[in-house]
Image (cartoon, rainbow, N blue to C red):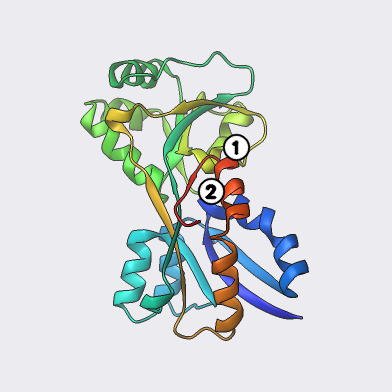
Amino acid sequence: MSTIDVLCTLGMRSVLVDVADAFTREKGVEFSASYQSTVALMERIAHGESADIAIVTDIAIETLIAQGRVLRESRRDLASSGVGLAVRAGAPPPDISTPDALKHALLSARSITYTVTGASGIYFAQVIERLGIADAVKAKAIVRDGLAGELAARGEVELAVQQVSELMQVKGIDIVGPLPPEVQKSTVFSAGIFTSAKNPADAVALIAWLSTPATAAIIRAKGMEPLQV
């Protein structure tokens, strides 16, 4: 049985995990995926790592295309995801329905976590600057990579901020909701085939599989909007 190697951003991990068995049964092809933030994956690629497929943010895919690492004609936008906020399961959810309410919730919380290199963490750093509370939030924040919700699940922080699709991957938390529209930003996740791919034919098949109506339903269930059906 042939294998496809995939470098995949954390936001799309739950989708790939869910489609793996059906794809393998139908196509007779397995895929081996490595999951990290887009920034971390881009650093690995910059240091010479490659695979068959990259699934990262749309900006990162365009960068890889410009660098000649990914085939332009292979690019496919798969899903968009907004940034959300979560608390430990059972904890009282704060009001984050407006920018002022979000500001109050962030200032009132004793501790907050968000990612240092993930798209949501980079954007959240801009949000707190816009709200004028950057210094106050940073003073009580734990900034890390990986799934931010894990710290909230363990009770180590009150609030976790990350892509909704990544928060949904963590047990033991309640998702309060997305950030209010005035300070929300959707991230697009895109796939592309490396110019150095060892299995380009099966890579095409997997990207097509990720663009089917069946996968679109999975994408919605994971807190995102499908972009190709």
Residue labelled with disc 2: 146
Residue labelled with disc 1: 150
Residue drawn at point x = 39 percent, y = 52 percent: 188
Q: Quadrant of residue 208?
A: bottom right
Q: Identify the element where label 2 is drawn.
A: loop
- For mark 2, does the 10 Å Cα neighbourhood hold few (<14), some (14 to 19), or many (20 or more) residues? some
Q: Quadrant of residue 140?
A: top left
Residue drawn at point x = 60 percent, y = 37 percent: 150
Residue drawn at point x = 50 percent, y = 38 percent: 164
Q: Gap in Å between the C-alphas at discs 1 and 2?
A: 9 Å
Question: At label 1, which amino acid type do we have?
Answer: Glu
Residue 23 bears which disc, if any? none
Question: At label 2, which amino acid type do we have?
Answer: Gly
- For mark 1, does the 10 Å Cα neighbourhood hold few (<14), some (14 to 19), or many (20 or more) residues? many
Q: Do the residues bearing badges 1 and 2 touch, measured as CB atoms within 8 Å?
A: yes
Query: Percent x, y for residue 158?
Result: 51, 23
